[in-house]
Image (cartoon, rainbow, N blue to C red):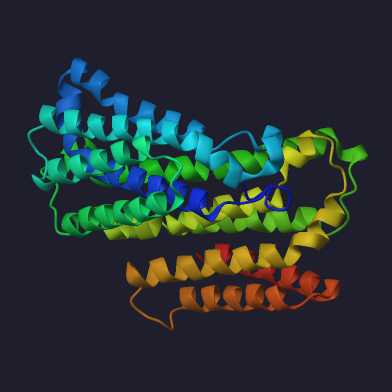
């Protein structure tokens, strides 16, 4: 969607449902840890638990069409005819939650009530899928139910910390690793395409160094995030907060590498960079602000620490790039950014 933002009509409602489902996925990942002990002990239970991720996969296909072949290039027009199918999948998803809770004794009692309410909302929208006001009202109610579940989960203590030597912290880190893995894939895939088509592409002097700086920043943050991993199992909100940085990196990778355009024969990467350089700086700023917020809410104890000085300087550079149009300014920002990352890496 980010790559096609200028050629496809984005639907706010569609975007809201996708964000809601991603938050639901994170919530389910957190709460599913209590099932791992039983899953490890019985292969039939393992097969049963696969129902939920399979339905999530089908939901992602129903909600995210192939934008290159979307009729009318309009997600608003796409959502209404697809909505009943989405709600049918949602109802089955919630039924899988109910089935899962019956198989595992360790589950909060309010889960059954919340799942039944969710099924009721889904059935209502299956019957009336085209009523826009009802859809939006039900989305608000669904968000409210999810927020209620998150609130009730804040003080929930997991029944055990390890299963066969595999800890809860490692389990949560796996989800983060999935996202960073997709980001890394976009970097390597795009660089591979650029190498293969190098003579056909108009790259210029600025585009590739910005991609390298983005990748180095990701490596630097990944290295430094080890300290905060110990905070993830303490609270589900810490887990949600920790995911903002890798998600923002994915958005950055989607903007800096127009993979879909490159695969269709687009060649003017220098022109693409000039059109999007301020957006790239905006995403850099969001990444650095998010990382600073996560660090200072978790492991960082001194606001004036050397780590925070590096973070604040990076935020200042990215903010300057958001408001400055001149190419020479962006080149100075790029040079200072690269020096800052290298100095920070060598100082650790």
Answer yes or no: is residue 227 visible: no
Residue 287 location (% of width, % of height): 54, 63
In the image, residue 235 above or below residue 329? above
Q: How many marks?
A: 0
In the image, residue 34 above or below residue 332? above
Instruction: Answer left or right for 14 relative to 115.
Output: right
At 33% across and 46% down in the image, what residue appears?
Answer: 24
Front residue (pair 166, 102): 102
Front residue (pair 338, 30): 30
Front residue (pair 295, 94): 94
**The quadrant where residue 205 appears:** bottom right
**The quadrant where residue 69 appears:** top right
Q: Residue furthest top?
A: 44
Instruction: Answer left or right for 119 relative to 202.
Output: left
At 34% across and 57% down in the image, what residue appears?
Answer: 140
At 35% across and 35% down in the image, what residue appears?
Answer: 127
Instruction: Answer left or right for 271 relative to 345.
Output: right
At 11% across and 30% down in the image, what residue appears?
Answer: 102
Answer yes or no: is residue 278 visible: yes
Residue 87 location (% of width, % of height): 38, 36
**The quadrant where residue 188 appears:** top right
Residue 90 location (% of width, % of height): 34, 35
């Amino acid at each position: 969607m980010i790559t096609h933002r200028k050629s496809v009509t984005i639907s706010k409602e569609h975007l809201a449902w996708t964000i809601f489902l991603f938050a639901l996925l994170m919530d389910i990942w957190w709460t599913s840890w209590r099932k791992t002990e039983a899953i490890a002990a019985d292969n039939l239970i393992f097969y049963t638990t696969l129902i939920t991720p399979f339905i999530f996969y089908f939901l992602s296909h129903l909600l995210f069409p192939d934008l290159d072949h979307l009729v009318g290039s309009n997600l608003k027009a796409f959502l209404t005819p697809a909505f009943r199918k989405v709600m049918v999948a949602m109802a089955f998803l919630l039924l899988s939650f109910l089935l899962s809770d019956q198989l595992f004794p360790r589950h909060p009692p309010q889960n059954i009530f919340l799942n039944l309410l969710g099924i009721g909302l889904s059935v209502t929208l299956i019957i009336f899928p085209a009523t826009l006001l009802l859809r939006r009202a039900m989305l608000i109610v669904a968000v409210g139910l999810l927020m209620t579940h998150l609130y009730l989960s804040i003080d929930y203590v997991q029944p055990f910390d390890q299963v066969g030597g595999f800890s809860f912290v490692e389990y949560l880190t796996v989800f983060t690793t999935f996202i960073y893995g997709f980001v890394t894939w976009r970097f390597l895939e795009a660089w591979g395409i650029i190498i293969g088509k190098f003579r056909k592409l108009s790259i210029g002097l600025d585009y590739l160094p910005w991609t390298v700086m983005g990748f180095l920043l990701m490596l630097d943050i990944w290295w430094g995030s080890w300290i905060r991993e110990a905070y993830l199992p303490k609270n589900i909100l810490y887990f949600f907060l920790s995911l903002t940085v890798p998600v923002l990196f994915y958005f950055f990778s989607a903007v800096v590498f127009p993979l879909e355009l490159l695969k269709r024969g687009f060649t003017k990467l220098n022109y693409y960079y000039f059109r999007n350089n301020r957006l790239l700086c905006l995403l850099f700023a969001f990444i650095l602000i998010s990382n600073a917020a996560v660090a200072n809410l978790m492991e960082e104890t001194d606001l004036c620490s050397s780590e925070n000085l590096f973070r604040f300087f990076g935020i200042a550079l990215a903010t300057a790039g958001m408001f400055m149009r001149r190419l020479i300014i962006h080149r100075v920002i790029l040079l200072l950014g690269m020096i800052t990352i290298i100095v920070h890496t060598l100082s650790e």
